[in-house]
Each structure stands twice: as structure tokens, then as C-alpha cells.
Image (tube, grey):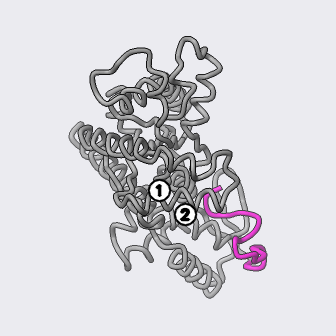
Amino acid sequence: MELAEDEDKSGEDVEKSGITVVSRHYEMPFSRGVLAKSLTAIGLAPHRAYDIALEVKRELVEKGVDRITTDELAEIVKNKLEKIDEELAERYELWRKIKRREEPIIVLIGGASGVGSSTIAAEVAHRLGIPNVIGTDAIREVMRRVLSEDLYPTLYESSYTAWKRLRYKPAGDPVITGFLDHSEPVVVGIEGVINRSMNEGIHVIIEGVHIVPRLISKEILNSPNVFSFMLSVDDEDAHKWRFYARSRDTKLSRPAERYLKYFNEIRKIHDFLVEDAKKHGIPVINNVNIDKTVERIVSYISSKLLKGEKELAKSRVGLL
């Protein structure tokens, strides 16, 4: 469903508008809530998106429209967006294509423990309308079922304590060596999820500390369907505070004290991931403000998809 649903997000009975949205597959009452959600996906603030949706409804009511196709409705929205910003109008048009496209969109959001990758992933998923969000910790648990502790002892540690189970003396920093050894089998699982998503056309967001650019195949990282990001928290004190906040606000199996005990190790992994992302041309975002971080990610994805759409159009023109 693209522009209609049973009930408006505000709680309004959508049938009261008397407007029916018609597509090839369904007929549903017009909903400001669903329309507003589609606008937040292109980067509009929720309150601004809702205002535009309200303007659209008023215009339709004033004109006495009782039936409208999704394409006609989208054209009205696009015209309103063009008056604000032509780029927003282009993003909206692209968003509609994304919802209908067969090729999947795969978003990778990496970052050390405590930088907020799970929160950001959930928000980005909401904005883009992607229902599938997978944490790399869940993939790690699956890999533990496949690989025994005797075979892969570091896998059975946390990312920041894996160095304790190394079977050899590393040439470099043991924390980073242990982290990489711990992450290698998890990345195998991550790539498996990505490959299946590509084959089956499933949009998915994968987030977590195991998104290590150097371990992920170049073919995947360079795929036009894959969008990678690395989150950071540049201020160490702010990073520490997040563990306290998370422990207070959620029922964690591990209290903040455990994370703070290994905070130096976590920061080493943090800095390593940031540098590794930079080496591979992956955007690094200092996650200070959730809304701004989500906005940057959504805007980046939208602009990249728009660029790809334009390049494809140019190539088709060249073939004529």
C-alpha cells in the first residue's frame, strides 16, 4: 500500500474524507498518515510532511474529488514539493520507484558498541519503509550454532574481549587482531544474508559492530544496491555516557559497568572501524543527533539512487 491505509496515523477515521485512492491492485480510503510517511522517506521533517499531506487533502476536498489514482495523487504531491525544493520533488519521484522496483536496497550500518547503530537502523528502516532489520549480533549467534567453540574460540567472546581467546601472539594490537578474528565468521553470515536478499529482491538493513569493510567482499561493497555507513561518537565522554543511558533505559543483560570496564578496548575498535571505513570510501557519520544522522543517511541513499536513475536514463538515450 503506497498512499492509503485503514486508519490515519493521527487516529482520524480516513473514510470521513470520502476520497478513495485507486491503483491497479487496490482501492483504499485516502490517508494523510500514509502520505506523510512517504514524505518523511525523502527527508522531510515529520511535521512538515504532515502539513503537506493536510494541504493535499484540503485541495482534493475543495475540488470535490472522490476518486483519484495513485499516479494522479503523486503528481499533486510532486507539484507541491517543487514549490519548496525541486530536489525534494525528484527524491519523492524516486522513492515511488524504489517502492516498486524489483532490485533490493541493502543498507549496512556499522559502528563500535554504544555508537547507536541499532537505533539509527530502526529509524532509517521506518523512513525508507524497509521492514527487515537484522543485527549482526543475531548473525553471530547463528554462526555459533555452526562453528564450535573449540574451532573458533574468539567467536564465543564479545567483540571487545575476543583478544583473550587468541591462540597465537599477534604481531599487531591484540585487541584489533582478536576483533578481526571474531568478526570473520560473522561476516560470512552477513554476506550470506546479503546474497540471499539480492537473489530474492528483499530490502534489508544490517547493523552492528561486525560490519568491517576490509572483511566484506569488494563485489558487495561496490554493488549499486548496497549502501554502507560507519557511525562514530567522536567525543569519548559522550560515548561513555551512552552506556549508562542504555543501561538505565533498557533491561540489558550486561550492565554499563561491563562495557566501561572494557571501554579502552571498545574505543580501539571504534577508531579502527572509522579508519577502515575511510580507507574504503565509506561515509563516516558522527552520531551526535539521531535525527540529523538519519537525515544524512536517507539523503545520501536518495541522492545516490537518483544519480543512478539519471545515468541509466542517459545510457538508454545513447542507445536510441
Judge whether residue 137 is colored magenta.
Answer: no
Q: For the point 47% across and 51% down, which residue is it? A: 97
Secondary structure found at label 2: helix
Few, some or many C-alpha atoms within 10 Å of disc 1 (few <14, some 14-19, many ≥20)? Answer: many
Q: Is residue 201 above or below residue 43?
A: above
Give the CA separation, mark 2 to mark 1. 8 Å
Residue closest to the far left: 318
Closer to the camera in the image, 223 or 243: 243
Residue 5: name its quadrant. bottom right
Q: Point out residue 63 in the picture as x, y percentages from the top left corner.
A: 61, 84
Q: Is residue 123 above or below residue 16?
A: above
Let me know if residue 92 appears in the view: no
Few, some or many C-alpha atoms within 10 Å of disc 2 (few <14, some 14-19, many ≥20)? Answer: many
Let me know if residue 2 appears in the view: yes
Residue 223 got which mark?
Answer: none
Q: Is residue 297 above or below residue 313?
A: below
| Residue located beneath label 2 in the image | 38
Q: Is residue 271 above or below residue 302?
A: above
State the extent of the magenta-drawn residues as a range: 1-17
Q: Point out residue 277 in the picture as x, y percentages from the top left corner.
A: 31, 42
Q: For the point 45% across and 42% down, which residue is it? A: 108
Judge whether residue 13 is colored magenta.
Answer: yes
- Pointers 2 and 1 in contact (C-beta within 8 Å): yes
- The amino acid marked with disc number 2 is Ser
Of label 2 and label 1, which has the lower sequence position? 2
Q: Point out residue 198 in the picture as x, y percentages from the top left corner.
A: 49, 31
Closer to the camera in the image, 74 or 240: 240
Decide whether the magenta segment is chiefly helix, strand or loop: loop
Q: How many marks?
A: 2
Is 81 positioned to the left or the right of 19 in the image?
left
Residue 95 got which mark?
Answer: 1
